[in-house]
Amino acid sequence: MKLVTFEHDGAVKAGTLEGDTIAICDDGPDADTAVLQRIRSGETGPWPPIATVSVDAVRLLAPVPRPLRDIICVGKNYVAHAAEFHNSGFDSTGKEATPSYPVIFSKAMTSIVGPEADVNASLDPTKSVDYEGELGVVIGKTARRVAKADAFDYVFGYTIINDVTSRELQKRHNQWVIGKGLDTFCPMGPFVATKDEVHDLDALELVTSVNGEVRQRAVVKDLIFDIPTLIATITATATLLPGDIIATGTPAGVGIGFDPPVFLSSGDRMDVSITGLGTLSNPVV
Ligand code: MG
């Protein structure tokens, strides 16, 4: 099942996507949190539809436009990207090129936008905006002290995240809250796929393009810390809640991997695709 949140006829609604058709399942006043509530309910059966509409007749929003809290993110989680970031001069985190433990930070929930929404690069006074295509993991139930072997029991599904970043602000402030949290800097979508839709997680291929030029290409198998390790590490000491979203890190090929760095500017277009999870496209303004 692919869960979507969207605008249609001037209202926010939620439902499921099948091919080019959306089944509208919630058109009430709280429809902007209906996908989140669906995840939190633990209900995995069919979501009863009210009506159907063509996907072309709606504007997709982030599938979870207002999560419970900030996105939990993983830094330096592909070997080649960890090296390019470490060598770029923008990594203020420490001495290690490849981390010994997962690098965990968070990204403001207020930065979330949907597919085709503008990413407002003009908010960055340092003009150092960069893309980071990532696999997002959606947690399905309260998770504490989870063993690696049980980790997928706590996964609801998957989506695409673009962890857009101001590199200068990321470096300048040491902690990444400001550099990662600019308004509009967290495109998400186009849908959340339940985990049964993904048959071979390791083989999923992530491809990021800028203006049609491929910049990032990797498979999930290349993660330094895989999804069970991330869930086990985080929940060893902290609780994950249903509806929490983990952005698992970005592969090599970001703008600071170039010499000199290549940053985004108004008029650029970013496309992040993951096998079976669709394409998340956003213009930069
Ligand atoms: Mg990232």
Image (cartoon, helix red, strand yellow):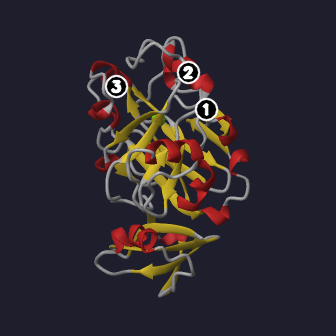
Q: Nearer the viewer, residue 58 or 174?
A: 174
Up-down: is 124 above or below 25?
above
Q: Earlier in the sequence, mark 3 or mark 2?
A: 2
Query: Residue tagged by mark 1?
Result: 224
Up-down: is 209 above or below 242?
above
Q: Earlier in the sequence, mark 1 or mark 2?
A: 2
- The location of residue 2, given as percent across then percent down, is 57, 67
The label number, if any, that marks residue 98 in the structure image: 2
Q: Marks 3 and 1: in contact by CB < 8 Å?
A: no
Under mark 1, the amino acid is Ile
Q: Residues within 10 Å of mark 3 (few under 14, many from 20)?
A: many
For the residue labelled by badge 3, is the local secondary structure a helix, a strand or a loop? helix
Q: Marks 2 and 1: in contact by CB < 8 Å?
A: yes
Q: Earlier in the sequence, mark 1 or mark 3?
A: 3
At 62% from the left edge and 36% from the top edge, which residue is drawn? Answer: 223
Q: Marks 2 and 3: in contact by CB < 8 Å?
A: no
Distance from disc 1 to disc 2, alpha carbons, whole Å, reads 9 Å
Q: Nearer the viewer, mark 1 or mark 3?
A: 1
- The location of residue 57, given as percent across then percent down, is 49, 71
Q: Residues within 10 Å of mark 1 (few under 14, many from 20)?
A: many
Is residue 232 in view from this perspective? yes
Query: Residue tagged by mark 3?
Result: 170
